[in-house]
């Protein structure tokens, strides 16, 4: 265990005295200062357990989920914690402030968060500048979305703009259609809308691959709040359109597991421990339908190495963490990577 991991419970206690979004920003700034001061070694130790997925070589099977570093400002600092791969974003073509504050809430007794951030980010140009400044040479996923004020019927234009921008710099690209915090976004999961989006992006991917002389896999990130028919339809469309993978899942709008908490009625996506079971069931269903033809990244509620193993057993090839990292710190990254080694 590193010094930083050992001290994390004390750091967390102090951070949890602050507003969640303030604490989030302070923690990331602090990580970046440590990394810039050449103290990255105290942040974590990467577990070497290489595996190949999407034709990419991952240092280990445990990644950082998108959303923690929306602007790609902290890639090097987060990589030093020991993640086997990093995903940043969601980025939109134009800068946007996101939803009004407060927009992030802790449910500490559940190891959970509710957020309604709403794709707050500095826009594509700033995002790409940050990504290009990073020294990290591992697998880097770039997560793309649409601006809040782009009509849903024009959403494909935003995704195309982002796809063209991030393509040369990404190891893989995640198409995020599952955040509950951008009005109408999840409507893109409906079969007719999804067919148009996936086929258009896949055609553009082929053009960009020729232009840049590189292969960049496309991965679809889906919601946990899907019925069985929707899962079957989305799995079929993902396969039919040649997408290279699925991320299961984003946050949930369900509050069944946290009823009675003072924040339970806040709008937004619930993440953390209560998400583990429903997200894992959705993962399992997708795995049944894709039948190993494309890999799935399992994310949602991982709080231990055993949780990570259960995601793999349900059909995931890789896992990602976010809320668990906030509650458990860098030790969770190492625990999960060792459990999957």
Image (tube, grey):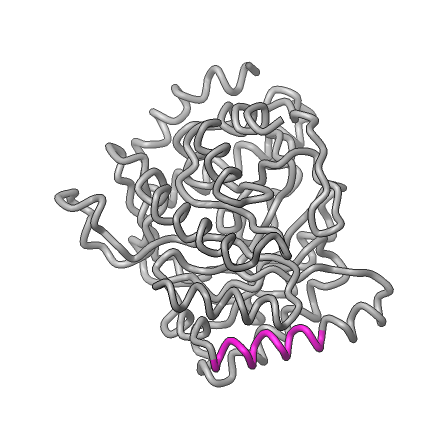
Measuring 71% from the left and 76% from the top, which residue is drawn there? 204
Vertical comparison of 95 with 299: above or below: below
Which quarter of the figure is the C terminus placed in?
top right
Q: Is residue 39 magenta?
A: no
Extent of the magenta region: 192-204
Q: Does the magenta stretch include residue 199?
A: yes
Measuring 74% from the left and 53% from the top, which residue is drawn there? 132
- Name the residue at the bottom extreme: 153
Q: Measuring from the top left, give residue 323's x and y in whole percent.
A: 41, 40
Q: Measuring from the top left, give residue 134's x and y in whole percent.
A: 71, 45
| Rendering quarter of residue 110 | top left
- 127 to the left or right of 314: right
Q: Measuring from the top left, give residue 268's x and y in whole percent.
A: 31, 57
Measuring 80% from the left and 68% from the top, which residue is drawn there? 209
- Name the residue at the left extreme: 260
Q: Is the magenta stretch mostly helix, strand or loop?
A: helix
Measuring 30% from the left and 31% from the top, which residue is drawn there? 17
- 90 to the left or right of 255: right
Q: Measuring from the top left, give residue 121's x and y in whole percent.
A: 51, 60
| Rendering quarter of residue 158 | bottom right
Which quarter of the figure is the N terminus placed in?
top right
């Amino acid at each position: 265990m590193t010094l930083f991991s050992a001290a994390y419970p004390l750091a967390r206690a102090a951070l949890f005295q602050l507003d969640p979004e303030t604490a989030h920003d302070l923690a990331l700034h602090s990580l970046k200062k440590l990394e810039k001061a050449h103290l990255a070694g105290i942040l974590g130790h990467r577990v070497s357990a290489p595996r190949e997925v999407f034709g990419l070589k991952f240092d280990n099977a445990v990644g950082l989920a998108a959303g923690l570093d929306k602007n790609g400002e902290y890639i090097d600092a987060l990589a030093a914690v020991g993640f086997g791969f990093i995903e940043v974003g969601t980025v939109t073509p134009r800068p946007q402030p996101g939803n009004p504050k407060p927009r992030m809430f802790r449910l500490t007794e559940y190891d959970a968060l509710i957020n309604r951030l709403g794709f707050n980010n500095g826009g594509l140009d700033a995002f790409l500048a940050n990504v290009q400044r990073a020294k990290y040479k591992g697998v880097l996923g770039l997560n793309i979305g649409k601006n809040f004020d782009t009509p849903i019927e024009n959403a494909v234009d935003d995704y195309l703009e982002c796809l063209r921008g991030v393509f040369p710099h990404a190891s893989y690209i995640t198409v995020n259609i599952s955040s509950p915090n951008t009005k109408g976004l999840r409507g893109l999961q409906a079969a007719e809308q999804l067919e148009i989006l996936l086929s258009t992006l896949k055609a553009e991917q082929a053009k960009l691959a020729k232009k840049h002389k590189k292969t960049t896999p496309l991965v679809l990130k889906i919601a946990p709040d899907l019925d069985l028919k929707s899962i079957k339809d989305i799995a079929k469309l993902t396969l039919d359109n040649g997408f290279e993978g699925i991320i299961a899942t984003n946050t949930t709008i369900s509050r069944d597991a946290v009823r009675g908490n003072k924040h339970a009625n806040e709008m937004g996506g619930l993440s953390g421990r209560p998400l583990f079971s429903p997200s894992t069931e959705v993962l399992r269903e997708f795995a049944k339908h894709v039948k190993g033809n494309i890999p799935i990244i399992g994310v949602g509620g991982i709080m231990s190495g055993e949780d990570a193993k259960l995601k793999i057993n349900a059909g995931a090839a890789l896992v990602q963490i976010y809320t668990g990292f906030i509650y458990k710190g860098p030790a969770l990254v190492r625990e999960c990577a060792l459990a999957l080694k």
